[in-house]
Image (tube, rainbow, N blue to C red):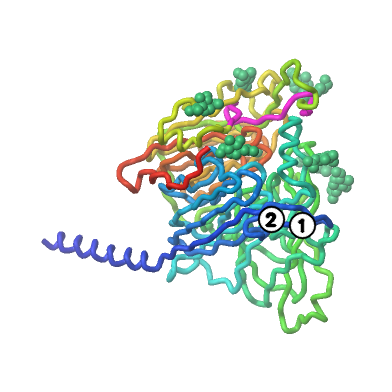
Amino acid sequence: MALVFTTTLLSFLLLVSSLGYLANAKTHNHDFVVQQTNIKRLCKTHNSITVNGQFPGPTLEVNNGDTLVIHVVNKARYNVTIHWHGVRQITTGWADGPEFITQCPIRPGGSYTYRFTISGQEGTLWWHAHSSWLRATVYGAIVIHPKLGDSYPFPKPKRDSVIALGEWWDANPIDVIREATRTGAAPNVSDAYTINGQPGDLYSCSSKDTVIVPIDSGETNLIRVINAALNQQLFFTIANHKLTVVGADASYVKPFTTSVLMLGPGQTTDVLIKADQAPGRYYIAARAYASAQGAPFDNTTTTAILEYKTATCTAAKCATSKPIMPPLPAYNDTATATAFTTSFRSPRKVMVPTEIDDSLFITAGLGINQCPPKTRARNCQGPNGTRFTASMNNVSFVLPSNFSLLQAHQQRVPGVFTTDFPAKPPVKFDYTGNVSQSLWQPSRGTKVYKLKYGARVQIVLQGTNIFTAENHPIHLHGYDFYILAEGFGNFNPKTDTAKFNLVDPPLRNTVSLPVKGWAVIRFVADNPGAWIMHCHLDVHIGWGLAMVFLVDNGIGPMQTLEKPPPDLPVC
Ligand SMILES: *[C@@H]1O[C@H](CO)[C@@H](O)[C@H](O)[C@H]1NC(C)=O
Ligand SMILES: *[C@@H]1O[C@H](CO)[C@@H](O)[C@H](O)[C@H]1NC(C)=O
Ligand SMILES: *[C@@H]1O[C@H](CO)[C@@H](O)[C@H](O)[C@H]1NC(C)=O
Ligand SMILES: *[C@@H]1O[C@H](CO)[C@@H](O)[C@H](O)[C@H]1NC(C)=O
Ligand SMILES: *[C@@H]1O[C@H](CO)[C@@H](O)[C@H](O)[C@H]1NC(C)=O
Ligand SMILES: *[C@@H]1O[C@H](CO)[C@@H](O)[C@H](O)[C@H]1NC(C)=O
Ligand SMILES: *[C@@H]1O[C@H](CO)[C@@H](O)[C@H](O)[C@H]1NC(C)=O
Ligand SMILES: *[C@@H]1O[C@H](CO)[C@@H](O)[C@H](O)[C@H]1NC(C)=O
Ligand SMILES: [Cu+2]
């Protein structure tokens, strides 16, 4: 009797509290009009693609638990889709956004409404176009505050600022990628990096628009850093100020203090900054972490200004002073990048899957395709008359063109993909040694790896030295994963398994795969759908550095992919 009473009371209390929670959760409606907009940067005006004429696009500000309904209208001349980077999209896979994976593109003149709920995520995420190179100008922040009534796991910051790092071409980015696709060569590198869309004082015609980040003496502020650059890992620092990292990819982390951050494209890092310096102006700066030896990269530096708004620091005294410039690590400073990426821990002990159902070993790296005889030389401008490519487990991923993978999966359309993505490399070799050129040419395919609902998955990601080794920011859609360990050289199960952090590993959606190294991640496949895992350098995804997990439905509506929305774009 007593037990029955207790459980009834308990479920009543649970019902009341979940109703209370539902009452607090809000639905935010937004219209995103993708359109051409004149934007002047580096002394020249370009007709760029933006959302609502804004660059960067609008910031979406929500509380954990809220629902977003975003009506996207495509008034531009390109196909477009929007991806909500890092949002788990549990059972709402149709709203994830990568073109030809979860939907066909929204064609010029078309529209699509994305509906999804933010659940259990707090911190900073972002949204961006997931079609060709449109995300160069089509991106914005997603700021997720704690649920109403909940607090941050640190004292409430006085101010909250977003810093989105971007990459600017003094050209149409779509022309840049189309030219590279035609020639087979690497695409032109960018001409500037940007902070909230502005290159800053070190570039021509830019100083008058340099972004100012306000701070007042004594206060502690939250800065949400997003790497929205297309193709470049970036170091980030603020002159004379320590940064206390408190979150990444919309999960809190055990706080640690550093003077420099390194973010791969796709990653976010939330930091607290205390105004404990003499009132004045301090540069916020970012420039490349370029891990590939000898490859060209944009070696410029973007800046914004951290400006004290103190009474004693009036316009006359401070606002005209030259900001202090911080030192930045050398472009190839892998030691600093590694010291940073290995400092992350979850705030407390977490439930890491210990038994594994699907154990994968996936190589990730570049390749080159020999040009078949009779191919025109102008289409073979890669190294020594080849074309650049890239692969995972020697499969260079090819996007379908007549169905999205999720549609093909759901409607059982044959001939769109095969389910034979290999769980291990087809050939074992010294991945980080001097790789024989006979192994440099991957095969092509639209191959997926099937997972049962609830499967516990481990992936050893292994970088290769094929053509050139480099750091790859590997991003998984639909999931956050624990990063158990990372290291250099070839992963060795005999010695490296002992290094796994099974206690408090960080939870991320993008892992920085070390140059000539490996990383191990684990997740539970508790979200049905078609989820792409890819390098977040757009130049590499275009070359095929991607694969897709197809995750089955489980039991009941909470474990089943919703029906496709009626306005889902079809090919
Ligand atoms: C790429 O760079 C080359 C060399 O500077 C230039 O001639 C070409 O026009 C650029 N391509 C695009 C699409 O901007
Ligand atoms: C950037 O690279 C160019 C050549 O591409 C070189 O002339 C210049 O000195 C480099 N700048 C820096 C700051 O390294
Ligand atoms: C980094 O680059 C400098 C020259 O710019 C070179 O002397 C040094 O050996 C490089 N370090 C590494 C680790 O590649
Ligand atoms: C290109 O050719 C040169 C000379 O034959 C050779 O030394 C080099 O290894 C080749 N590079 C590639 C990427 O094939
Ligand atoms: C979709 O495209 C693939 C590859 O071009 C082709 O093999 C398949 O038959 C097409 N499927 C349908 C239903 O048109
Ligand atoms: C890599 O192997 C090739 C072919 O075996 C050889 O020609 C080359 O010298 C080697 N390079 C290095 C750096 O060992
Ligand atoms: C990849 O597959 C191609 C084609 O089958 C083969 O020539 C090449 O050696 C393979 N490379 C690796 C690294 O497995
Ligand atoms: C735009 O998307 C459609 C499918 O919806 C596709 O057939 C077409 O090739 C795409 N256009 C470009 C330029 O990619
Ligand atoms: Cu990559």
**Helix, strand or loop under label 1:** strand
Q: Is residue 7 left or right of residue 290?
A: left
Q: Residue at x 74, y 52 (%)?
A: 47
| Residue 38 x, y percent position in the rendering | 74, 57
Q: Is residue 563 left or right of residue 232?
A: left
| Residue 289 x, y percent position in the rendering | 73, 47
Q: Residue at x 46, y 32 (%)?
A: 359
Amino acid on which the number 1 mark rests in the picture: Thr
| Residue 117 x, y percent position in the rendering | 44, 56
Residue marked by disc 1: 302
Category of crowding for the residue at label 2, using alpha-carbon neighbours closer than 10 angstroms: few (below 14), some (14–19), many (at least 20): many
Residue 144 against residue 76 in the figure, above or below: below
Amino acid on which the number 2 mark rests in the picture: Leu
| Residue behind label 2 places its C-beta within 8 angstroms of ligand 9 | no
Q: Is residue 184 left or right of residue 505?
A: right
Quick check: can you spot residue 85? yes
**Helix, strand or loop under label 2:** strand
Residue at the limit of the structure toward the left, as seen here: 1
Q: Residue at x 32, y 65 (%)?
A: 19
CA–CA distance in space, label 2 to label 1: 9 Å
The verdict on residue 38 being magenta is: no
- Is the residue under label 1 in contact with that under label 2 (CB below 8 Å)? yes
Q: Residue at x 68, y 46 (%)?
A: 230
> Quick one: 289 or 179, which is closer to the camera?
179
User: Hey, which quadrant is residue 304 in on the image?
Assistant: bottom right
Residue marked by disc 2: 165
Quick check: can you spot residue 262? no
